Image (spheres, rainbow, N blue to C red):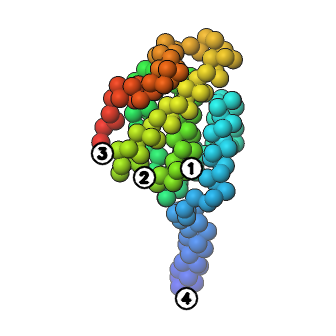
Amino acid sequence: MQLTQYFQQACAIIALAAGLAAPAFAERGPSTPEERARVVALAEAANRDPIGVMNSADGRWFMKWSDEIPDYSFGPDRGALWMETGAAKGDLRRVLRFHHTLSTAAYQVQHQMFDPMKDPAQMEAKTMAGIDGLLRAYESLKDKRPENRSEVLDNALMLRDQGKLATLYKSLPQPPRN
């Protein structure tokens, strides 16, 4: 009789633990209008203070949110690959990579681009928005600390200011396809 009671208690404990753990493993629902508005506002704030936003609770929220939401895909693009292949180094690259992700996400939610990888025109527009965003962040960082200079990014700024950002985009390597 005691063995049966132990078995029942063990089953009850396992059921309780599984019930408590289930919400942690449940897939979340689609993004909300409030979350999408928060992303757009965060991207605008990051144009002025990229490091502050990246290191803030809002920045951490964004990274978690962008990984979890099922309705948008913020996959890699030419701009992200460009950051990884030497456009910037060290901490500057880390900040600009964050800002690129944030800028592309803001652009995608503003234009309801759920999966731009399915449409080359959307992919180009998303990538250009990300590059433009990271260049705005770069300008802000460079103004505050001139030692943050990057010749590659200075050349990209020059192209952007001449209205030739599309030329830069076309020169970037394609990310590998999965």
Mark whose residue sits in front, 3 or 2 = 2
The local secondary structure at tag 4 comes to loop
User: Could you tell which of marks 4 and 3 lies nearer the N-terminus?
Assistant: 4
Horizontal side of residue 118 vs 19, given as left or right: left
Mark 2 / mark 4, whichever is N-terminal:
4
User: From the viewer's perspective, is the residue at label 1 or at label 3 nearer?
Assistant: 1
Between 169 and 3, which is closer to the camera in this rendering?
169
User: Dividing the picture into quarters, in which one does residue 94 lie?
Assistant: top right
Badge 1: how crowded within 10 Å, few (<14), some, or many (20+)? few
- SS assignment at label 3: loop
Q: Disc 4 designates what residue?
A: 1
Amino acid identity at mark 1: Gln
Q: Position of residue 48 (x, y in %)?
A: 69, 29
Residue at x 65% of width, y 34% of height: 46
Q: CA distance from mark 1 to mark 3?
A: 26 Å
Q: Which label number is shown at residue 110?
A: 1
Q: Are marks 1 and 4 in contact (CB under 8 Å)?
A: no
- Counting residues from the start of the chain, the first of labels 1 and 4 encountered is 4
Disc 2 + disc 4, Cβ < 8 Å: no
Relative vertical location of residue 96 with respect to residue 24 in this rendering, above or below: above
Say which amino acid is labelled 3.
Asn
- The residue identified by callout 2 is 115
In three-dimensional space, the C-alpha distance between marks 1 and 2, rounded to whole angstroms, equals 13 Å
Give the x, y percent position of residue 118: 35, 51
